[in-house]
Image (cartoon, rainbow, N blue to C red):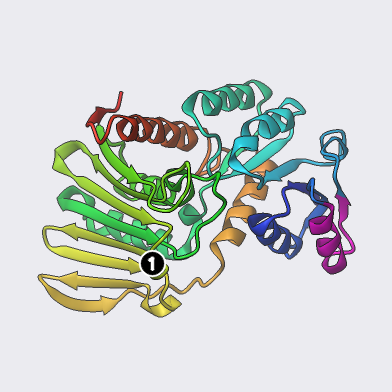
Amino acid sequence: MMKLALIGCGKWGRNYLKTVSAIDGCELKWVCDLDYEKLNQAHAVYPQTRFTENKADILNDSEIQGVIIATTPESHYILAKEVISKGKAVLVEKPVTINRKDSHDLIELATAQNTVLMAGHTLLYHPAVKRIKGLLEEKNIINDLYYLNMCRTSSSPPSPKVDILQDLAVHDIYLSLHLIGMAPIWVIAHGERYVQSTYNNVINILMGFPSGKIVSIFASFIHTEKTRKMTLIASKTKLVFDDTQTANRKIKIFHNGQQEQFLSVEDNSEPLKQECLHFTECIRENTEPISGRENIELVAKITDCISISLEKGGEKITIC
């Protein structure tokens, strides 16, 4: 029986609590949060789990093999560092850290401790994304790719302490890297704070890849509706992935301008469950996660460059 722990019992923390508690062969032994009321509410639903306001209960428990961190972004670095220093595997919800230096520090520490460091880049474990990735490789579509257009919006703003780059746009950053299979060479970004906030709530990002491939990302906290859409345009193929649709209508493929078919996805499992299963597998086998150190390093590098472009009013930044 693998024993895990969770730090953070907010919205995403509760999702992890529900998901991990339902995985066979896995015990969520501890849940930690500084908010006693959140712990009390969760305890009523999961009486078999121990709840604590003291992270030391988790850090000092020799039975705990892995820890999931789902707290506010600014606390991720120090918590993950403490967990890794104890030799425990760690899964950190996005963003892993708020800057590249901190991510690099965690990567070096995890390497020295020979333990698993994994990012909560949930879409990499989405059955529909796996289906799309397989199709792109099977048909060799990426070589003929023109551009990807990605849109991720919400009408309900999150905590005022979260920038849309790190909250919503980061999903499409790591997703585009995964699908294209290479790193961008430049970025351009412009953001605005249309609603009272010290952080951007609307952002436009352009990423340039080798051979002229382009990825455009639009993300907004103040939209009229929730959108989770990606359009891929290649020389002979067009593909639309709309994650708000039902499982059998998420992926549409067009060939020579005509709709060819909806691409079926037989696996309807939740992406978060697949992510957590992958985490436990990597701990058990001591293998590198899909969203492991290399993925974390690259995403951190790109988001840092995007932040520089934002600070410089949309200046084109070369990624090196």
Among the 4 quarters of the image, the one containing residue 225: bottom left
Judged left or right of residue 232, residue 128 is: right
Q: Main secondary structure of the magenta part?
A: helix
66 inside magenta stretch = no
At 72% from the left and 48% from the top, the residue drawn is: 8
Name the residue at the front extreme. 196
Q: Whole-percent x and y of residue 200? A: 41, 45
Say whether residue 1 is visible.
no
Depth check: 121 or 77 in front? 77
Among the 4 quarters of the image, the one containing residue 289: top right
Depth check: 291 or 167 in front? 167
Q: Whole-percent x and y of residue 41? A: 82, 64
Say which residue label 1 marks. 227
Depth check: 101 or 267 in front? 101
The region drawn magenta spans 36-51
Q: Whole-percent x and y of residue 178? A: 37, 47
Depth check: 170 or 290 in front? 170
